[in-house]
Image (cartoon, rainbow, N blue to C red):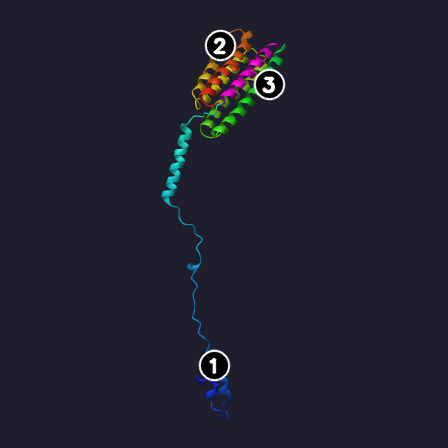
């Protein structure tokens, strides 16, 4: 039996209507509740976490800027060669030359020049780093990196040949080897630097060739002329023309 749509107050109080009254109360309490409209939650309603696609024009502009920067670095010159540091290296050699010439044994003579080379190398590295930092010139990128890569192999070859010639007892040829290979390193590395640097390297190479042609007793004098005099002269030129 379907209960009537009205409340209990309209049900006649007659015998046998108690069951009908309970049905009416059940209908009023539960079946006449406010109807809840169904709602559907779509997956697209959630916030999207997908990143927007990059703008092709922006990517192209960034690539163009990167290409221009790399091209400028390749075409540029490393101008952070330390002029005054090169002068200091020259004075170190000028002090070492007479000291080495007074040594009684070839071993002691070699030790003096090896210590001189280590001190000069430290002076050159520190002054180069200082000038590169002041000029904001990258030392391990662009022209600076190419200069280092051009300078290092001949110097490394000189170190190997020094050990070989020392083992063979051929001390007399060491001044020519040192001047020649140091000049080759300065010339090849200096091709990525200012003009005075490769010219200085060429002068060192000439001094090395001369050392092979003159008597062995001239070795210290040529070392003083090359590592001392050439470094001082060209260091002053670099300092005056290229900012220290």
Q: Which mark is residue 240?
A: none
How many other residues sit within 10 Å of disc 2, few (<14), some (14-19) or many (≥20)?
some
Q: Is residue 124 shown to the viewer in this render?
A: yes
Q: Nearer the viewer, mark 1 or mark 2?
A: 1
Q: Which mark is residue 28?
A: 1
How many other residues sit within 10 Å of disc 1, few (<14), some (14-19) or many (≥20)?
some
Range shown magenta: 82-102
Tag 1–tag 3 contact (CB < 8 Å): no
- All told, the count of numbered labels is 3
The x, y position of residue 179, in whole percent, is: 51, 15
For label 2, the residue is 210
Q: Which mark is residue 115?
A: 3
Residue 124 covered by magenta stretch: no
Q: CA distance from mark 1 to mark 2?
A: 122 Å
Q: Residue furthest left?
A: 57
Q: Is residue 187 shown to the viewer in this render?
A: no
Residue 92 covered by magenta stretch: yes
Name the secondary structure under disc 1: helix
Q: Between disc 1 and disc 3, whose residue precedes?
A: 1
The x, y position of residue 73, in whole percent, is: 42, 30
Residue at image point 46% right, 20% down: 240
């Amino acid at each position: 039996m379907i209960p009537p749509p009205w409340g209990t107050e309209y049900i006649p109080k007659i015998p046998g209507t108690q069951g009908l009254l309970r049905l009416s109360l059940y209908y009023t309490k539960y079946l006449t509740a406010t109807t809840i409209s169904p709602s559907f939650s779509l997956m697209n309603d959630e916030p999207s976490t997908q990143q927007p696609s990059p703008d092709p024009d922006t990517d192209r502009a960034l690539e163009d800027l990167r290409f221009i920067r790399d091209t400028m670095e390749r075409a540029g010159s490393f101008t952070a060669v330390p002029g005054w540091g090169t002068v200091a290296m020259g004075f170190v050699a000028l002090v070492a030359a007479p000291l080495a010439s007074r040594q009684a044994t070839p071993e002691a003579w070699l030790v003096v020049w090896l210590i001189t080379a280590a001190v000069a190398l430290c002076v050159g590295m520190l002054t180069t780093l200082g000038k590169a930092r002041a000029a904001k010139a990258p030392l391990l990128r662009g022209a600076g990196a190419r200069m280092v890569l051009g300078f290092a192999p001949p110097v490394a070859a000189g170190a190997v040949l020094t050990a070989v010639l020392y083992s063979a007892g051929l001390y007399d040829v060491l001044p020519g080897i040192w001047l020649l290979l140091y000049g080759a390193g300065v010339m090849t590395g200096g091709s990525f630097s200012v003009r005075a640097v490769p010219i200085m390297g060429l002068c060192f190479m000439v001094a090395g060739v001369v050392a092979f042609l003159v008597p062995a007793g001239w070795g210290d004098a040529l070392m003083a002329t090359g590592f001392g005099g050439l470094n001082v002269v060209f260091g002053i030129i670099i300092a005056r023309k290229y900012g220290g």
